[in-house]
Image (spheres, helix red, strand yellow):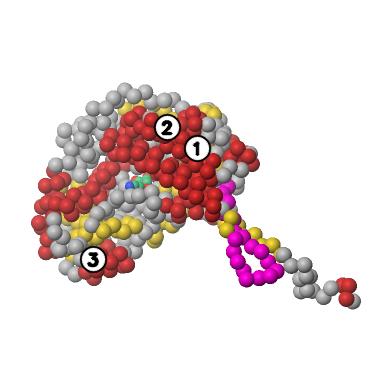
Amino acid sequence: MANRNVPIPRRQLYIGGEWREPVKKKRIPIINPATEEIIGDIPAATAEDVDIAVEAARKAIARDDWGSTTGAQRAKYLRAIAAKVLEKKSVLATLESLDSGKTLFESAADMDDVAGCFEYYADLAEALDSRRKIPVNLNSDSFKTYVLREPLGVVGLITPWNYPLLMAIWKVAPALAAGCAAILKPSELASITCLELGEICREIGLPSGALNILTGLGPEAGGPLASHPHVDKISFTGSGPTGSKIMTAAAQLVKPVSLELGGKSPIVVFDDIDNLDIAAEWTLFGIFVNTGQVCSATSRLIVQESIASAFLDRLLKWTKNIKISDPLEEDCKLGPVVSAGQYEKVLKFISNAKSEGATILYGGERPQHLKKGYYVQPTIITDVNTSMEIWKEEVFGPVLCVKTFKTEEEAIELANDTKYGLAAAVMSKDVKRCERFTKAFQSGIIWINCSQPTFNQLPWGGKKRSGFGRDLGEWGLESFLNIKQVTEYTSAEPWAFYKSPSKN
Ligand SMILES: NC(=O)C1=CN([C@@H]2O[C@H](COP(=O)(O)OP(=O)(O)OC[C@H]3O[C@@H](n4cnc5c(N)ncnc54)[C@H](O)[C@@H]3O)[C@@H](O)[C@H]2O)C=CC1
Ligand SMILES: NCCCC(=O)O
Ligand code: NA
């Protein structure tokens, strides 16, 4: 077991390059979901602190040491942050697990991904220097033009608890690469590692105000950020209802938003797969990784009737083999869900499914051997119909619901039978069929013969009620840039649209 006694730093808000007590001096307890114990506290920002942070960000943009940097100069800061994350990886991973319940293996992988994301955007920041000013030929003797890519300005980044530091970095890294000044508002349910990012920025000497970190409650800290007149964009990942509130607040000021709002993603398994075990493992990974708290979780299994019984049998064998324990224990593969609220919510989904007539094929309860902590067994639900809540709503927990199909048309119809459109997976060895599904799936992310692998280079986001806009890849950088056209009249001749007064 990793050292559970890693001290939890007592931090303040990170504003203008300094630790600063919240104006109202309030704090929020940190709860370890594996033990239900309070292990520390975080500062609770309010509108007053948002004002101070926005001012610090505006000053950073106005100052040469941030506002006039080249991409290559910003890349140096991003690489220094990446190196510090790797240097502190073991402590950061332990803190992430203590705060969120994530298995230590997954937290450590997240820290590698965090460093990788900073390095990836360092490369893109450098490349931006040659793309910053692009001449456009108009085939005109009278006009010379070019297009500039410039930082959008002050950006608000509101992020969730399921990948506390990684989801923040998917926005922080491209925002800094673009040259924006950012205000990060992580989730009050898991903020420790985001505050430690503040300490890293201080240690590497990131110019003050380029990144500000405000922990606090959604309505009290996130709300004022979303509606602040001097915040030029909000990038949000989280729940649909909160995304909708943020969009409403931003709409009052015609402030651009990008929203990544989760889903109810399908995984379609055909009877032509060669190896049931390989397909079974991907199916379980698609829903049980991070205890199912993944926006792209493939939470609806749609399996061809002819192999349904054999496939479910295989799924059960693999599921029974999953180690559920304290996330710091070696080989733990399923930790607790993040909070008491999430635990109650997941169990309620399961009991509602039961009362609507579905069958709990496996799991559905707290594991017998764990008396404390917000643990839920990996759960597989069958006899599901398309009007049931468990088919329609995002659970955000380790709960897979299953339906069978006979024909390809039926499978596509079931896969798209959702208000969401984030991800979708198909398992089949028929290449043409996979191409047909790639076209037919109404979503932003398609996985073929796998589920969940995620790469910095690829756009991440959805359609329908999963939101709009993209994190990651070059699209993640573009979302923090303003495109400015510059048009110059180069002719010595008059424009001659109006009659010249000298000709009267
Ligand atoms: N798509 C995803 O990645 C996620 C989906 N969820 C889903 O959402 C459900 C609720 O979880 P929550 O933690 O309550 O998610 P949430 O969407 O309310 O929280 C995400 C972020 O938004 C902030 N926030 C909340 N209310 C706000 C407001 N009025 N204005 C501005 N910011 C606000 C939160 O403080 C947090 O930083 C979960 O049970 C899960 O189903 C939760 C987290 C991530
Ligand atoms: N594999 C990362 C998934 C991130 C998300 O839940 O949005
Ligand atoms: Na926590």
Residue type beneath disc 1: Tyr
Which quadrant holds the N terminus?
top left
Decide which of tag 3 and tag 2 comes sooner along the chain.
2
Q: Vertically, is 243 above or below 435?
A: above
Q: Which residue is mark 1?
A: 77
Decide which of tag 1 and tag 3 comes sooner along the chain.
1
Extent of the magenta region: 135-161
Question: Are the residues tagged 1 and 3 within 8 Å (C-beta)?
Answer: no
Residue type beneath disc 2: Lys
Residue 255, x across and y down, in percent: 55, 53
Asked if residue 237 can be seen in this view, the reply is yes
Q: Mark on residue 256?
A: none
Asked if residue 390 can be seen in this view, the reply is no
Seen from the viewer's position, the closer of residues 442 and 356 is 442
Q: Which residue is mark 2?
A: 84
Which quadrant holds the C terminus?
bottom right
Find numbered disc 3 in the image and state the secondary structure of the residue it sits on: helix
